[in-house]
Image (cartoon, helix red, strand yellow):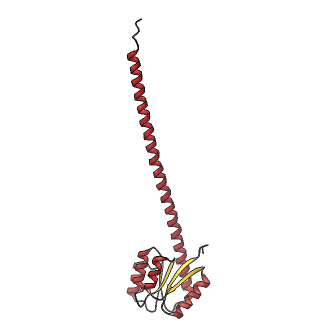
Amino acid sequence: MTDRSHKIMLVEPDAEVLEILVASLSRRFDAHITCVADATSCLDIEIVDPHDLVIAELELEDSGGLELSEKLMALSNRPVILLANEARCDDITEAMRLGVSDLFRKPFRVEQFLDATGRVLRSHDLYRRRAAKYSRMRELVRRVISERRDLNRRIELICRDLVGAQRRLVHRVLALEEKKPHQVN
């Protein structure tokens, strides 16, 4: 995948499901996995130490997975995958509107889940590389514009000096012309 280890947050209150997910994700990906059971803990951690991917249960005790997804995406652009025992059509529609990467109904095929997780992580890596590239390009353009402005200021100063020197030269020539006796032939 990449030479960088991924950080994955699992928000799952069911210990059995959590164990299966951690084992499966650990086998497939080089990832640091953080596990919490509720949305509040997830948000507390994400504010301080953001993860590359959040995988959350849709039905959490302290908050819904959709509400958590909305708050996570407001913090930063990170992908979210939701897991649901039952997903109503409204939940799926709202998840799509929010930009949730995927939604899996339990029980799901682990291999299919891992494939989707891999696609999401690759897509997020690509996004991060592009964002870093554009950030470097913006910095380079900012520097070029700054240097161009500085160069324009210097050229303007040189032009002013040249105009001033020409005026002084003209005044000296005129002064010499006035002092010089007129020759009669």
Give the quadrant of the N terminus.
Answer: bottom right
Q: Residue at x 56, y 90 (%)?
A: 20
Nearer to me, 35 or 66: 35
Please determine whether, in this image, residue 141 is positioned above or below residue 37: above
Nearer to me, 54 or 172: 172
Q: Residue at x 40, y 29 (%)?
A: 167
Please determine whether, in this image, residue 162 is positioned above or below residue 56: above
Q: Residue at x 44, y 48 (%)?
A: 149
Return the x and y of residue 69 as percentages of the image width and height. Answer: 43, 81
Query: Could you tell me if residue 96 is visible in this image?
Result: no
For the image, the number of numbered tags is 0
Nearer to me, 181 or 15: 181
Rendered image quadrant of residue 66 = bottom left
Q: Residue furthest front?
A: 179
Give the quadrant of the C terminus.
Answer: top left
Query: Is 96 displayed left or right of 2 in the figure?
Result: left
Rendered image quadrant of residue 31 = bottom right
Return the x and y of residue 153 as percentages of the image width and height. Answer: 43, 44
Query: Could you tell me if residue 85 is visible in this image?
Result: yes
Please determine whether, in this image, residue 114 is positioned above or below residue 179: below
Nearer to me, 99 or 138: 138
Return the x and y of residue 34 as percentages of the image width and height. Answer: 53, 83
Return the x and y of residue 121 as percentages of the image width and height. Answer: 54, 77
Q: Residue at x 43, y 37 (%)?
A: 159
